[in-house]
Amino acid sequence: ASGETVMACKVPPGDVQIDTLALGGGDPSDNFFWILDGTDRKTQWTVLSPTWNRGQHATLEALRHIEGKFPFDILAMHSDNGGEALNHHVAAYLGSKTRKPFLWRSRPRRSNDNAHVEEKNRSSGRQLFGEVRLDCPSLQDELVRLCDDWSDFRNFFCPCKMLVSKEKRPDGKGYKCKYDKPRTPYQRVLDEHVLTPEQETALKAYRARLSGMDLYRRVLKRLRKIRRIQAAYDKAKHAGEDLSPFAARPALALHPFGDGWTSPRRDAPHRQQPAYKP
């Protein structure tokens, strides 16, 4: 991608780009959900997590959730110039870690500086949600579960390819690009040999319990449920009815936001727990 000084195929795993995706249905007014997207440049491991209105605290909680779903340590974090990522909450959190990730940002008005996560916003985020508006506060837990299932489906069952060379054509018209053999992000992570024995064993065991078809059916079922709840909320709001049944509910009790896989982390004591939930 333009804006890269070192191609993604030449960096180690852990160079992560983050960005937000609006679920406002084209209407930026009032409050609604956003999706925080974290994508590793080298392995293309991608995790989505919802956040309410991009508040600094809510975004930090989504970022912690994303970090827990990565099978390796985040070494560097790249974002655009949005205040949801560049703030004291995130800086203090990253600064408190034993292995402090390097935080850097895109140049102003250069969206291609964050090209990998921007592409995943389209192929992962927008493909899942479309242009729907989700502003029912009680959808938080359902969105977390949906994003976790969808992230697993994409990371374990959807092959992707990577650009390995890009040369200007002799006639000056465009570039000649070469790509590697398509592999899933899961396969790419294992091929990099960056996991500890504990992490690799836990990741393989989790993969053995997954079924791509079951995950996809669960994603469709959760989407239908979310649309039903949102439709009921819209109807009640337009009719001027009591909206208290749709109020925000407490976060899921299971750590960090729900069941599923959480990577063992050496530098985060709050995640020292069994690697996978039953």
Image (cartoon, rainbow, N blue to C red):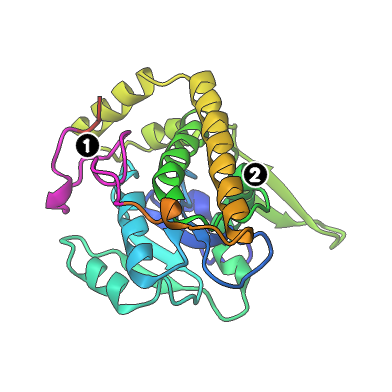
Identify which residue, 221 or 54, lies in the foreground: 221
> How far across and down, in percent of the image, does residue 153 sit?
50, 31
Q: Amino acid at mark 2?
A: Gln
Image side of residue 167 versus residue 208, left or right: right
The magenta segment is 250-274
Indicate the quadrant containing the N terminus: top left, top right, bottom left or bottom right. Answer: bottom right
Residue 127 has which mark? 2
Identify which residue, 15 or 34, lies in the foreground: 34
Examine the rendering and report whether any part of residue 149 can be seen: yes
Indicate the quadrant containing the C terminus: top left, top right, bottom left or bottom right. Answer: top left
Q: Which residue is under mark 1? A: 196
Q: Secondary structure at mark 1?
A: loop
Instruction: Name the residue: 32% across, 36% down.
Output: 193
Instruction: Name the residue: 46% across, 30% down.
Output: 156
Q: Are marks 2 and 1 in contact (CB under 8 Å)?
A: no
Q: How many marks?
A: 2
In this view, the mark in front (2 or 1): 2
Dividing the picture into quadrants, the one containing residue 159 is top right
Which comes sooner in the sequence, label 2 or label 1?
Answer: 2
- Mark 2 neighbour class, 10 Å CA radius: few under 14, some 14 to 19, many 20 or more: few
Image side of residue 20 versus residue 140, left or right: right
> How far across and down, in percent of the image, does residue 89 sit?
28, 73
> How far across and down, in percent of the image, does residue 245 sit?
42, 51
Image side of residue 41 versus residue 66, left or right: right
Identify which residue, 19 or 162, lies in the foreground: 19
Q: CA distance from mark 2 to mark 1?
A: 33 Å
Instruction: Name the residue: 30% across, 34% down.
Output: 259
Q: In the rendered view, would you say 172 is above or below 162?
A: below
Q: Is residue 272 on the magenta stretch? A: yes
